[in-house]
Amino acid sequence: MKAGLISRWALRALTRPLASASRPRRPWNAETLASVMQPGDVLLVEGDQRLSQVISYLTTSPWSHAALYLGPCAPPLCQEAAVARFGDDAAHLIVEALAEEGVAVTPLSKYRLQRVRVCRPRNLTPEDARRVVEDAASQIGKTYDVDNIIDLARYFLPASFVPARFRRDALHFGAGKPTEVICSSLIGAAFERVGYPVRSLDARVERRSMGSRIARELLGKSAKNFRFKRTPTTLIVPRDFDLSPYFDIVKPPTRESMHYRDLPWETKA
């Protein structure tokens, strides 16, 4: 009972919006952003909660949250209730793991007042993109790893109390139960199930017997047989999609970039 009260208190404290949170100069348009997005794209969000600050600090990145773009509402990804709830915004939906609600479907326009970045998995086949989307959507209803949040709460301490080498590990002390996820692990697991990497691959040499190696060399074949080591999805954080060599950054078109020669630059008197 006492642990439950502490969890709820930590949840309320960490998800409270920050009054000083930085915001874009003007809201971005969901239709414009969606025009360059594809199902399976990852949306990174800067965030405006205390939890966002903690994750940004621990990962040394402005991106504190990740969501997966689903595209327009269509069964079995979402129900009629989503259309009734979001109205026209149901045309562009994302799936995300939220501390307050767990894994849920929400409209892309939800983050129009926050800085975002779109990361696209390079060369992902349409079939695998569909599988990634369906896998993430199948997790709807799972709860957020609140134990992870309580662990994060300890890191409101001064920066000197958390050595740099421990910052990433601090994100993974949670319960790790199969019914509980955090935003980036939800998406990372969906990509892993189709064999698509998020972080740089770590090649591991498969060990062979001495006789096998000699035989391969005599036959003129390489003695090296590489196997790639999988990264545990619980170790994936939002910034990994931003820095990943396998994801491209996609930016929406802007009026200024399309007609830069017509910009009204101020001239010196």
Image: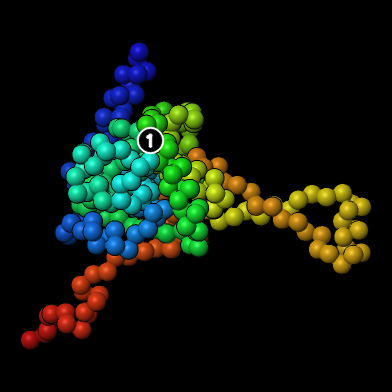
Q: Is residue 128 left or right of residue 139?
A: right
Three-letter code for the amino acid on which mark 1 is drawn: Ile
The picture places residue 170, in percent across and down from the top left corner, at 46, 38
> Residue at image x 33%, y 21%?
6
Colour scheme: rainbow
Mark 1 crowd level (few <14, some 14–19, many ≥20, 10 Å Cα): some
Is residue 61 at all visible to an observer of this figure? no
- The residue most toward the left is 269
Residue 8 or 162: which is nearer the viewer? 8
The picture places residue 45, in percent across and down from the top left corner, at 32, 50
Which picture quadrant has residue 106? Answer: top left
Which picture quadrant has residue 82? Answer: top left
Q: Is residue 139 left or right of residue 109?
A: right
Q: Give the labeled residue for mark 1.
A: 140
Residue 173 or 213: which is nearer the viewer? 213
Vertical placement of residue 185 versus 146, above or below: below
Vertical placement of residue 257 versus 194, above or below: below
How many numbered circles does the render carry?
A: 1
Q: Is residue 10 left or right of residue 86?
A: right
> Residue at image x 27%, y 69%?
253
The picture places residue 251, in percent across and down from the top left corner, at 32, 65
The picture places residue 30, in percent across and down from the top left corner, at 23, 56
Q: Is residue 82 left or right of residue 151?
A: left
> Residue at image x 83%, y 50%?
208
